[in-house]
Image (cartoon, rainbow, N blue to C red):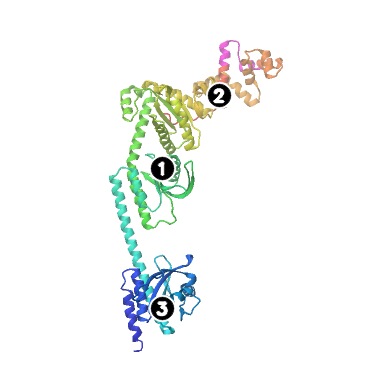
Amino acid sequence: MDQNPQVLPLRDVASLINSGGDLETVLHHLVLAACRHADWTMGSIMSIDEPHGRAYVLTRHDPALIKKSLPESWELATSPSIVALRRNEPVHIRDARLSTEFPGYQREAFERDYRTVLVIPMKCVDRHGRPMVLTVVSRNIVDVAEEQLAFLGLIVHLGEIAVEKQHRLEAEQLAGEKLQKALQAQTSLLNQALAEPSVSALAARVGVILPNPTLVVDFAANLVVAHRSPDPSVFSDVDWEQSADTVMHQQILKAARTAAEHAETSERTLVFDNGRVRLTVNALVEALRIDGEVVGALLLFPVGEEFGRLDRMLLESAKFALSVVMMRSFVRFRFETRSLEEIFNDLVDRGASRDRGDVQARARHLGLDLGSPHQMIIVDLHQGHRSEIVDLRHVVARAASRKRISATVVALKNLLVCIVPAAMGKAETAPNFAPSILDEVRRYSGQDPTIICSMPCHQIADYATEWGRCERMLRIGRAFARTGILNNENFGPLPMLLAAANVPDTRHFVEESIGPLARYDGEHGTPYLETLSSYLNVGCRSQACADAMGLHVTTLRYRLARLKELFDVDVDSPDKRFRLELAIQLHRIIHDNPAPATLQNVP
């Protein structure tokens, strides 16, 4: 029976503490229970922010009739709270008016008329993860017995249980709210993807829903949509979004393409430069695919927190919704690309050009009016990949748009063909636009392409003729490893024979004329072919040839005799001399420049 006075209040304490509807109410009831059932006048609960050296009052119980303006935070240097936490035991100040260890309490003891202070550490934290203490005070001097401390300890323990329970309830409530929001966001994304064909609008919505700054890249539409700067100290949101769509467009497109084709999900360190500032940032690159083909990418810039389960669910929903919307532009782009390629094949195929009306009508449907003169700008990217060719098609198209040139760009296997009006004003468009294409391709791909401009094509039949001429120039450029903008003036007349030097009949002619002679020199180290070439170059004059080669004329005559004896070389008539000269020159071209690989992109 002796314990009933404390056991019964414990039941009331437990009921009081657990009757709260939120954390603040639970804490307030805890202070009220400690004061009411343990005979203390006033009390409070404080959270301790040790890194910043402050203690904050979370709740108070003060039955004083006269309300006073009380401090809401304390310096830890003047508070016994930090001492109680560090020692993990109560701190008892028998008479705060006489204590000089804690001057803050000494001053307040006079202001609020109290004497004894008891500070008890709690094994729980507030919403911000900060530890808490319970402080109770009495207007009288109280010597706290062990039984009183044990009773207060039980009250505090019940309060700790209630606080942890409240934390769990709030966490579950927050998780439920986040799940509900995630489901609503997921539904809205899918509804928008089905109802709204705009990638830009959906990308903006994705940027709002996901917690990280985002970049959405649509390869087919050549579109970059940025939402929020990954580093506001370097780029403001407005500057970032504007730069992403203009000066940094190609940088973002190339970086996203490289990462997305490398892996489904990858973390990359990316560098962006708008000409004024430079940003190096880590990004998570998520590939967007349709039928196994990469059509876009979603870039997320980490902000310090890893993705949780719900964030990952939203990310997957965003990827799916973006892929659905991009499917439209992907299908449209693929249809347009195939249609343009088919039209181009018909233009440069002499046999297909019979139905010129059909070709002209289909071209007009795609925005190419063949009724007016046009020129072709052929860009040979040598070892360019298909995805890079597609991106460069967009790059060239954007460059033409900036210069207000009506251009139709066709992407072949490793060629770009840009068809532009033959003239704008007094100057021809193609020669003036070609340097811009060269700069853009260099900037994007890092390689030097070969560029050739056709002559103006006034009729449909002209395209096949000009394509044949440009194809020969491309072969010559590859054979001599020439890059840049090329034309006939870049080569002497002799290299033009290279276009024919790879024809089997031409090689047979060289073999029949000087083949045995060339092989004999190779096997025996003799200079007979060199001697014959020099002799023909000086018009078959012995002394001039001997002087040119640094030989005695007798030696030269001996070599000429051996040429006649071994290989039946005859230079008596002009026709025979020309035959030998031509064979020697063709042999030199073929020998120094082996047959180039076939231009696989030629229709």
The disc label shown at residue 242, or none: 1
Q: Position of residue 155 (x, y in %)?
A: 38, 78
Q: Nearer the viewer, mark 2 or mark 1?
A: 1
| Magenta segment | 562-580
Q: Are marks 1 and 3 in contact (CB under 8 Å)?
A: no
Find disc 3 in the rendering and name its residue: 113
Does 67 appear in magenta? no
Residue 574 among magenta residues: yes
Mark 2 is surrounded, within 10 Å at the Cα level, by few (under 14), some (14 to 19) or many (20 or more) other residues, namely some
Q: Please, what is the dominant secondary structure of the magenta stretch?
A: helix
Q: Nearer the viewer, mark 1 or mark 3?
A: 3
Q: Residue at x 42, y 30 (%)?
A: 417
The N terminus appears in which quarter of the rendering?
A: bottom left
Disc 2 from disc 1: Cα separation = 53 Å
The first of marks 2 and 3 along the sequence is 3
- Residue extending furthest toward the bottom: 1
Query: In which quadrant of the rendered image does the C terminus lie?
Result: top left
Q: Nearer the viewer, residue 363 or 9?
A: 9
Q: Residue at x 69, y 16 (%)?
A: 547
Q: Are marks 2 and 3 in contact (CB under 8 Å)?
A: no
- Residue 478, position as x, y percentages in the image: 51, 29
How far apart are the alpha carbons under marks 1 and 3? Answer: 64 Å
Visible in this render: residue 603? no
Q: Position of residue 78 (x, y in %)?
A: 48, 72
- Which residue in the protein does label 2 denote? 589
Vertical side of 308 occupied by 522: above or below: above
The amino acid beneath tag 1 is: Gln
Q: Upstream in the sequence, badge 1 or badge 3?
A: 3
